[in-house]
Image (cartoon, rainbow, N blue to C red):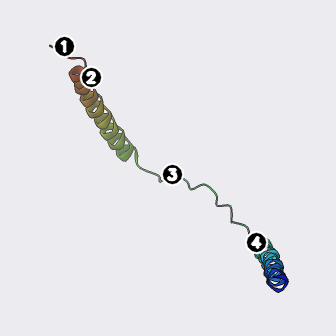
Amino acid sequence: MDRLRAQAEQREAFARQLEIETRLNRQRIEAARLPEPILPPTSRALRSPEEERVLRQSASGRRAAAASEVGQINAWLDRPRD
């Protein structure tokens, strides 16, 4: 029994040693890693006034369509229940 207990303690000590070495290696690797570069914000794509107007109009149309659909859903939900 004593021999088995001593072997178990040796295995536990070896496992702890490997865990510490692993932690140290990971810290070394992380310390050596280059920091992420800070990218400047990208500038907006320049568009002509006509393109901007067309985009605004299409966005207005999408908003109106969404509002219409939501209105239909609300009307259906608010219908009288018999």
Q: Nearer the viewer, mark 1 or mark 3?
A: 1
**Image quadrant occupied by the N terminus:** bottom right
Front-most of residues 26 and 19: 19
As measured in the structure, the alpha-carbon distance from the residue carrying label 2 to the one carrying label 4 is 55 Å
**Which secondary structure lies at badge 3?**
loop
Displayed quadrant of residue 65: top left
Q: Nearer the viewer, mark 4 or mark 1?
A: 1
Displayed quadrant of residue 71: top left
Front-most of residues 39 and 47: 39
Q: Amino acid at mark 1?
A: Pro
Residue 23's spot in the image, x, y percent? 79, 73
Q: Amino acid at mark 2?
A: Asn
As measured in the structure, the alpha-carbon distance from the residue carrying label 3 to the one carrying label 4 is 35 Å
Between discs 3 and 4, the one toward the N terminus: 4
Residue identified by numbered label 1: 80
**Is 45 on the left-hand or right-hand side of 40?**
left
Between discs 4 and 1, the one toward the N terminus: 4
**Which secondary structure lies at badge 1?**
loop
As measured in the structure, the alpha-carbon distance from the residue carrying label 1 to the one carrying label 3 is 49 Å
Residue identified by numbered label 2: 74
Between discs 1 and 3, the one toward the N terminus: 3
User: Does 82 sit above or below residue 18?
Assistant: above
Residue 32's spot in the image, x, y percent? 78, 75
Q: Residues within 10 Å of mark 3 (few under 14, many from 20)?
A: few
Q: Residues within 10 Å of mark 1 (few under 14, many from 20)?
A: few
**Which secondary structure lies at badge 2?**
helix
Could you tell me which residue is drawn at 76 percent across and 74 percent down? 26
